[in-house]
Image: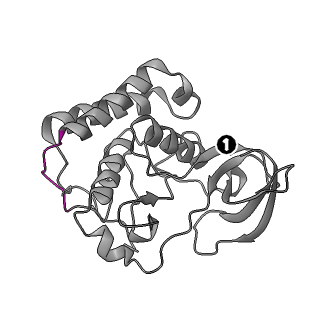
Amino acid sequence: MSGELVVEGRLVDASNATLFAKIVTDESVELAVVYKPIAGERPLWDFPDGNLASREVASYLISEAGGFHCVPTTVMREGPFGIGAVQQWIVIDENIDFIELGQSSEPSIRNIALFDVVVNNTDRKFGHILPISRREVYGCDHGVTFHEEFKLRTVIWQFAGTPLNDEEKEKLSLVRGFISESATLTELLTEIEIAAIIQRIQTLESEGFPQPSDQWPAVPWPPV
């Protein structure tokens, strides 16, 4: 994602500064992106360490390392308002009912549900589900992830209590290998947060998909 980053507008529904932009290369190729500068983040009491942009990038790295492939390409880079997360803009199929899809048992949704447990996503809303097709589905807005305490909040609970299959266990193994072999995450997350990823993987392997908690809201608000 190298090239000039040109801001074209702001996504007004976002709680933090979220800008629609394009990257223009030397060959005049344009790539639509979402740019989230760190300078535009609002402080969160329950995420005091680091920044949300780093968590966006870490989510992408885990998605790729584990073979989930459910997060659009995301990098940390400079822009007109300083360094921030820059993510490829996904053009969705607007004929797909993303609420119905998010409540379905499609393998693409189960894939996102498993990924959300691994990264400890506290904000999986229906509006964060980006379907290109029913088989190819991405997710966005991964800034509030990787908390050391288990705080999963999601609209995808239909797999609760379900054991993992062999393919899903292999994805977890790939994530564990990435963490042990790469130092990249240490630049984005704290040591405690990285250790918590391993703990969540171990729990997933032994217990399968978690049940909704009775200690905190299990669904983000608003759900869309």
Residue 28: quadrant of the picture: bottom right
Residue at image position (79%, 56%) is: 29
Residue 203 percent coordinates (x, y): 21, 35
Residue at image position (26%, 70%) is: 103
Residue at image position (56%, 43%) is: 57
Residue at image position (35%, 50%) is: 116
Q: Is residue 5 left or right of residue 134?
A: right
Give the mark count. 1
The residue at the far top in this view is 181
User: Is disc 1 placed on a helix, strand or loop?
Assistant: strand
Q: Is residue 54 above or below residue 11?
A: above
Query: What span is in magenta?
Result: 158-165
Q: Amino acid at mark 1?
A: Met
Image quadrant in which the C terminus is located: bottom left
Q: Is residue 55 left or right of residue 131?
A: right
Residue 88: quadrant of the picture: bottom right
Q: Is residue 127 above or below residue 78?
A: below
**Residue 149 on the magenta segment:** no
* Residue 103 seen in render: yes
* Residue 151 seen in render: no
Q: Magenta part mainly helix, strand or loop?
A: loop
